[in-house]
Image (cartoon, helix red, strand yellow):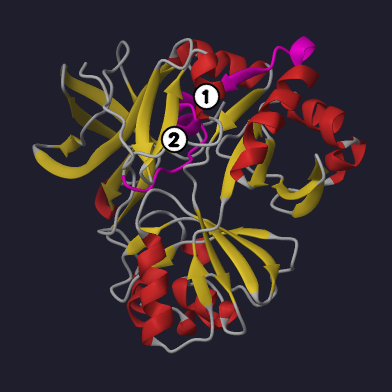
């Protein structure tokens, strides 16, 4: 495999030096930043994540700050999700669409107050779309990328680790709620959230200079918890039905096709860009939609490209992510399946790089 040549165009993070010292074995590039992909190996990292606690460098989840009197108006223009009742200590998962109803991103919106929001983005140039809407609409807002770098604490022992560093009250934080914590005299936002189903937190580290001291404090406090450096795990996220923008859904898909219709409700959908298109799809239903697939046979190869899903010689969808699940003892996958064949339990054929496989349509997350 060729090496990744890192230049100034590929930004390191406030935690990159510590990640390197922890023995990272692979990176990908995400929002022009380094994102670790493996430490020991994917399966060993998976088992450790499910049993202990990991610290993830996810600084690549860049923030778009929207600040000013028209901030709430602009944020609502981005998404069909109703934000009117969102509290100042809440985080919302939001599909972001353009005028065609196609998805541009699936970020987490972090509301600080009516005039200040962060949009924690997946891999895309969403900053420029938001800037364009603000300028074109002559809205009274500033749109920029602040010096904020998320650090995720994930795994069943994450509550214990966080309480040792920040106090027992952190355990009372509810899912998708956030609060301020103090570390070395600086306040940071921490949310109960993260890109795994194992539970945990995301610390929005404000100021790059605080990255390494915070990393070190977590590792010092968690030695007896077997804390390790980790990263989003492909096996665990597929099992949990966590979607990857750019892989499982793209601009070619609407929120309804991505299975996110529950986030497209409420009267404020009419204020969203693409509202008319989404309303028609809401009434008629999507022609295809995300599903899980259990694929037969031995371990499937790494899914670097889409794999056709076939029934009676016709293509009825495609697999977009796949991995062997040690705990479920089968290959698990996520795919986009046509309406005619998306019913749970239907049998299909998947054309993998090492041959055709029989598969069954499954719900997401995969049943344990």
In-image side of 264 versus 54 (left or right)? left
Magenta-span inclusion, residue 125: no
- Comes first in the chain, label 1 or label 2: 2
Q: Which residue is mark 1?
A: 17
In-image side of 158 versus 254 (left or right)? right
Give the answer, above or below, for where 269 lies relative to 6.
Answer: below
Of 193 and 10, which appears nearest the observer?
A: 10
Give the crowd class for mark 2: few <14, some 14-19, many >=20 residues within 10 Å: some
Q: What x and y, as percent, mark residue 184?
A: 80, 39
* Quarter of the figure with the C terminus: top right
In-image side of 49 versus 347 (left or right)? right
Q: What x and y, as percent, mark residue 59?
A: 52, 41
Residue at point 39%, 61% (across, down): 126
Q: Which residue is mark 2?
A: 12
In-image side of 346 versus 65 (left or right)? left
Look at the numbered discs 1 and 2 and tell me whether their residues touch, using CB distance below 8 Å.
yes
Residue at point 28%, 46% (across, down): 337
Under circle 2, the secondary element is loop
Q: What x and y, as percent, mark residue 6?
A: 31, 30
Residue at point 57%, 34% (across, down): 196
Magenta-span inclusion, residue 234: yes
Q: Quadrant of residue 156?
A: top right
Of 277 and 330, which appears nearest the observer?
A: 277
Identify the magenta region: 222-246
* Quarter of the figure with the N terminus: top left
Give the crowd class for mark 1: few <14, some 14-19, many >=20 residues within 10 Å: few
Find residue 65 and name its label.
Answer: none
Gap between marks 1 and 2, in whole Å?
9 Å
Under circle 1, the secondary element is helix
Of 179 and 331, which appears nearest the observer?
A: 179
């Amino acid at each position: 495999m060729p090496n990744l040549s890192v230049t100034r165009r590929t930004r390191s993070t406030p935690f990159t030096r510590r990640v390197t010292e922890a023995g990272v074995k692979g990176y990908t590039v995400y929002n022009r930043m380094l994102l670790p992909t493996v430490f020991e190996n994917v399966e060993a990292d998976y088992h450790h994540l499910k049993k202990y606690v990991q610290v993830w460098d996810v600084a690549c989840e860049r923030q778009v700050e929207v600040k000013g009197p028209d901030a709430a108006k602009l944020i609502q223009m981005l998404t069909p999700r109703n934000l009117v009742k969102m509290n100042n200590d809440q985080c919302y998962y939001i599909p972001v669409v353009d005028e065609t109803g196609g998805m541009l991103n699936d970020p987490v919106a972090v509301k600080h107050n009516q005039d200040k929001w962060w949009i924690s983005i997946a891999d895309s140039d969403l900053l420029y779309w938001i800037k364009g809407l603000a300028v074109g609409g002559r809205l009274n807002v500033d749109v920029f990328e602040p010096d904020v770098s998320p650090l995720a604490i994930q795994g069943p022992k994450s509550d214990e680790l966080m309480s040792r560093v920040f106090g027992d009250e952190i355990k009372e934080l509810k899912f998708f709620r956030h609060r301020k914590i103090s570390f070395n005299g600086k306040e940071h936002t921490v949310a109960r959230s993260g890109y795994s189903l194992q539970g945990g937190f995301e610390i929005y580290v404000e100021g790059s200079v605080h990255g390494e001291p915070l990393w070190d404090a977590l590792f010092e406090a968690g030695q007896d918890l077997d804390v390790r450096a980790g990263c989003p795990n492909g096996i665990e996220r597929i099992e949990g039905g966590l979607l990857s923008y750019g892989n499982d859904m793209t601009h070619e898909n609407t929120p309804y096709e991505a299975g996110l219709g529950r986030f497209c409700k409420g009267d404020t959908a009419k204020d969203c860009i693409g509202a008319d298109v989404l309303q028609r799809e809401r009434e008629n239903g999507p022609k295809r939609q995300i599903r899980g697939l259990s694929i037969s046979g031995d371990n499937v190869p790494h899914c670097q490209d889409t794999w056709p899903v076939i029934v009676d010689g016709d293509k009825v969808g495609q697999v977009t992510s796949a991995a062997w699940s040690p705990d479920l003892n089968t290959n698990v996958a996520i795919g986009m399946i046509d309406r005619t064949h998306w019913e749970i339990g239907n049998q299909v054929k998947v054309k993998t790089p090492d041959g055709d496989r029989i598969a069954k349509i499954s719900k997401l997350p995969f049943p344990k």
